[in-house]
Image (cartoon, rainbow, N blue to C red):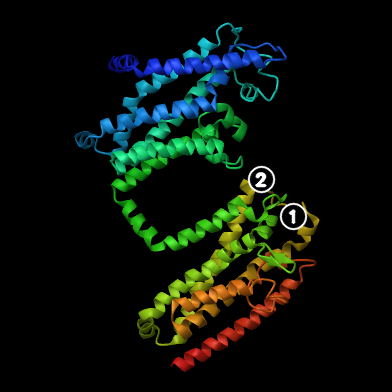
Amino acid sequence: MSYIKKIFDEFTTWKWSIFIIIILLYGWSIRVTFAANNLEQLPLNQWDIIFTFLSSPFLNIYFYLPFWLFFSSQLIIKEWDYTLLIRLKSFPKWIFHTISRLSPMLFIFQTFSVMVSFLVAMGTPVENEWSVWGMTYSPLNNVVFVLQGTGLSPWIILLLQTALLSLFLVTLHVVTASIYARFPRMNVIAGTSLFLFIGAIISYKIFPAVFVLGNVTNYSILSSAYSTFDSFLPSFILLILIITISLSLIVLWSKGFLQSLAIFLSDHYRFIIYSSICLIGIFTQFTHSGLKVLHVWENLYFNFYGVSKDGFSLYIYLYFCIVFLGFVYLFQLHLSNLLNGHIYYLMIRYKSFYRWFFQLMKRTILSVISLLLFLAFATILVGLIQGRTLAFDTTESMTELFPYIFYHFFMNGFLQMLNYILIVFIVSWVWQEAMYSLIALGVLAVAGLPILNTNQWLPSGLNSMGYVTDDGTGVFSTSIVLLIYLLIEIGIIAYLFEHFA
């Protein structure tokens, strides 16, 4: 009885009068639009108007969303009480408490929405099946046609649409409440609500079609979810996952785990930024946008194309340098830290420059191998997610070149990275100032351009996939060039060690 009383108390608040008037006027405009645009005079029924009304992205994003965020934020602020937190004993329980307090509003919200949808559909035939218009494709019928294609009855679709929108709104509330529990300030909750609202508009109006996971309509409108994922389940699963992650993070924060995570991020933020840039480049595939890529091995070829004998693209080569020289930059930072004071302690431990250098290179070699495996695995995985195939017989030329592409990426990529690292090591050892190492990285980036490296005799950029051409045998001469440079660099390092000693 107490819950029914809460629903009744919520029902009598002033906001629902304004809510009903606005959605009733909008629903009637949809009814008028139907009458004007049904030029074929195909038979309609009430479901055509109901689902077009309930599936309107403008209604869901521009009215429902700010309406919900405002009153959800109000309730969160009202229920934030330390006495209540002590009684509930945990933040997740407090969040569930706010959901229970918000549920009468959600119930009335959905009830009025469905009631108004039936109200504006009055006068059309009342049927339990889809109409002829709903089963006929047209540019104006991009909602009901998708829904009837599921094979489910309109009543089940109505239930699922209500459930999806409810779960979406609850998810927004959980995210807002979780952030407020961590930062209980008025400007934080206002900023969070504004961010969610503007983010929803951007995801709907600006995001390209390929970013299906970022489109808010796929989580609030059933027809969008089904047309995107060919199923209703992904939308429900992803919303539940967001709720679970939000609650898990607030639990971890309350137990102090996030403080350890913050320390870890502050210590490794450079590597995290570097890895993120690599993944963004692989995922967005801007290096070969517009090209028809059939299998994942072409992805590997184009993602790390670098330069070729015919020339280069600035953006493609810039990403190539970020991936490979960026890793060398991280090595240079680590090396500078060792040379600035720690080297003497290391000499006491290892008793020889050679033993220390061997241990350093052993770890570095493992890191380079891990980098190449990570790049290849990420490229293959992203390609599979985006619908590419693992088959080798889709493109004849690529099938013939695949062994050389594989060899060039791993073997020449490995040798090229070692050359970069040893060159930076020599510069750091001689000058022992970070500025000279950065200059060396800049020189290596410029030296890799085909304008200077005409015959591929400089040890920079030689692992570019653009050099795998014709019959592919040129990759073996590249290996020889890189090995010769490695021997020269090792000899220079041995001389420096003897001279330093």
Q: For the residues carrying marks 1 and 2, which lies nearer the camera in this image?
A: 2
Numbered label attached to residue 141: none
The residue positioned 26% from the left and 31% from the top of the image is 79
Determine whether 229 is above or below 337 in the image: above
Q: Position of residue 212 (x, y in %)?
A: 57, 39
First in sequence: mark 1 or mark 2?
Answer: 2
Cβ atoms at labels 1 and 2 below 8 Å apart: no
Say which amino acid is labelled 1: Phe
Q: Is residue 281 above or below residue 107?
A: below
Q: Which of the pair 24/387 is nearer the observer? A: 24
The residue that label 1 is drawn on is 392
Say which quarter of the image contains residue 375: bottom right
Q: Which of these two is toward me, 439 or 169? A: 439
Q: Is residue 442 left or right of residue 455?
A: left
Left or right for 431, reference 41: left
Q: Which quadrant of the figure contains the N terminus?
A: top left
Dot 2 amino acid type: Gly
Residue 229, compared with residue 182, is above or below; it is: above
Residue 343 placement, left or right of 361: left
Label 2: how many Cα within 10 Å (few below 14, some 14–19, many 20+): few
Residue tagged 2:
387
Q: Is residue 192 something one can see in this rendering?
A: yes
Callout 1: few (<14), some (14-19), or many (20+) C-alpha neighbours within 10 Å?
Answer: some
Q: Quadrant of residue 52?
A: top right
